[in-house]
Amino acid sequence: MERWRLLGEKSPPRVQRSGHELTIRWRLDAEGTSELEALAASERECCSFVTWSVSRQDPDTLLTIAADPGRPEGLDAIVALFVAS
């Protein structure tokens, strides 16, 4: 959680949810993007009930988290973490 908090301090996340998919955007430098990729890799191990992918859409770095379309409530707790920060 501390690493997520520090990433949010570098660039406040902008959160958008659409159904079973959550997209979080940051303006990150190369170091911040590497940290986001490492965090997503860790989350894939512990929270495999959703998918975690990192991509670029200049000037933003995006984290997309997707739940099973039939179970969008799988994102509820994750959304709360990013909205609270």
Image (cartoon, rainbow, N blue to C red):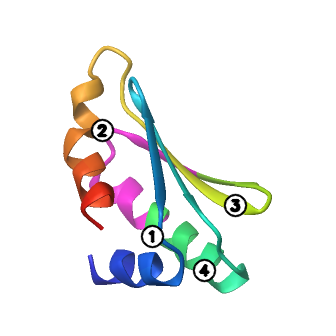
Residue at the image position 53 percent from the left and 70 percent from the top: 36
Q: Amino acid at mark 3?
A: Asp
Q: CA distance from mark 3 to mark 2?
A: 26 Å
Look at mark 1 in the image and give the residue it sits on. 39
Look at mark 4 in the image and give the residue it sits on. 32
| SS class, disc 3 | strand
Q: CA distance from mark 4 to mark 1?
A: 10 Å
| Cβ atoms under marks 4 and 1 closer than 8 Å | no
Residue 60: numbered disc: 3
| SS class, disc 1 | helix
User: Where does residue 10 sit, x and y in percent of width and height?
Assistant: 52, 83
Residue at the image position 30 percent from the left and 38 percent from the top: 49
On screen, 35 above or below 37? Answer: below
Please report the bounds of the magenta region as a residue range. Answer: 41-53
Foreground pick, 68 / 61: 61
Answer with left or right where residue 50 lies relative to residue 51: left
On screen, 47 above or below 36? Answer: above
| Cβ atoms under marks 3 and 2 closer than 8 Å | no
Answer with left or right where residue 62 lies relative to residue 78: right
Q: Looking at the image, is mark 3 or mark 1 earlier in the sequence? A: 1
Q: Looking at the image, is mark 4 or mark 3 earlier in the sequence? A: 4
Q: Amino acid at mark 1?
A: Leu
User: Where does residue 63 sit, x and y in percent of width and height?
Assistant: 54, 53
Q: Residues within 10 Å of mark 3 (few under 14, many from 20)?
A: some
User: Where does residue 43 sit, x and y in percent of width and height?
Assistant: 37, 60
